[in-house]
Image: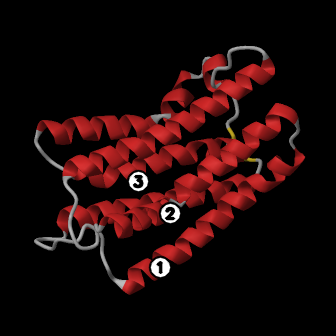
Amino acid sequence: MKLIGTRSLLGAAAMVIVGIVVSMMANHYFTSGTGEEALTTSRWWWEIVLNLQILCAAFIWFAHTEQVKSATGWRHAVTLLQMLSSLMAVLLPIWIALFAITLGWFEVRPGLEIINQAFFLCLGLWVSARILIWAIKCWGKKRLLLPKHIEEGRWHLVLLGVSPLIAVLVLTAVEMSRGGYQHYIYAPFLLYIQAAVPYLQVSFRLEKT
């Protein structure tokens, strides 16, 4: 493994930080006792979150801005969409706070079905953005593109790359089978780790064995 770039490491760091924040927010929802608020109203907590949001947005901007400036044609569209989708992803805590203010979640705890709907909405938007980026790449290169490690037949690296997603699926299956809720707490962190994988792949080159 060889480090070939440091900018993308900032993108990975942003995803990890936001994953921790969102998981902590989910933890408050499930472990806040008898309180009605779905989100903490602690001022110091939201000050920390706001500062982390600014930091993470700056990390994403710094990780992508040079590529956006230098790319042309369809590659410019790809790099711009990558940056915008990542910015939307790392700003999720702010989006949650804005929805909470609008819908009164700070005073009245929403039902679990609303949490599920919000989760699948966010996940659907992220997946849609990734599919759109992939489609533009295929159109630009005039061929069906597969992940590099699949084309090279390096299946152990493919499994390593999707291991956070596999962990989410296993954890969800286990928790649902026993009526638990831990998957709601840990899945956001694992999914953001999954979102950090492309940044890590850009930052490190794995030598063929």
Q: Which x, y percent locates residue 145?
A: 68, 19
Q: Residues within 10 Å of mark 3 (few under 14, many from 20)?
A: many
- Find residue 134 and report its image quarter: top right
- Locate the N terminus by quadrant: top right
Seen in the picture, residue 128 relative to 67 is either above or below; the reply is above
Tags 2 and 1 touching, CB below 8 Å = no
Looking at the picture, which amino acid does disc 1 mark? Ile
**Tag 1 secondary structure:** helix
Q: In terms of depth relative to the viewer, which is nearer, 47 or 190? A: 47
Label 1 vs 3, first from the N-terminus: 1
Marks 3 and 2 sit apart, C-alpha to C-alpha, by 9 Å
Q: Which x, y percent locates residue 125?
A: 50, 41
Tags 3 and 2 touching, CB below 8 Å = no
Q: Label 3 belongs to which residue?
A: 189
Q: Residue at x 81, y 32 (%)?
A: 74
- Find residue 124 and report its image quarter: top left
Q: Label 2 belongs to which residue?
A: 17
- Locate the C terminus by quadrant: top right
Looking at the picture, which amino acid does disc 2 mark? Ile
Q: Residue at x 35, y 49 (%)?
A: 118
Q: Label 1 belongs to which residue?
A: 48
- Mark whose residue sits in front, 1 or 3: 1
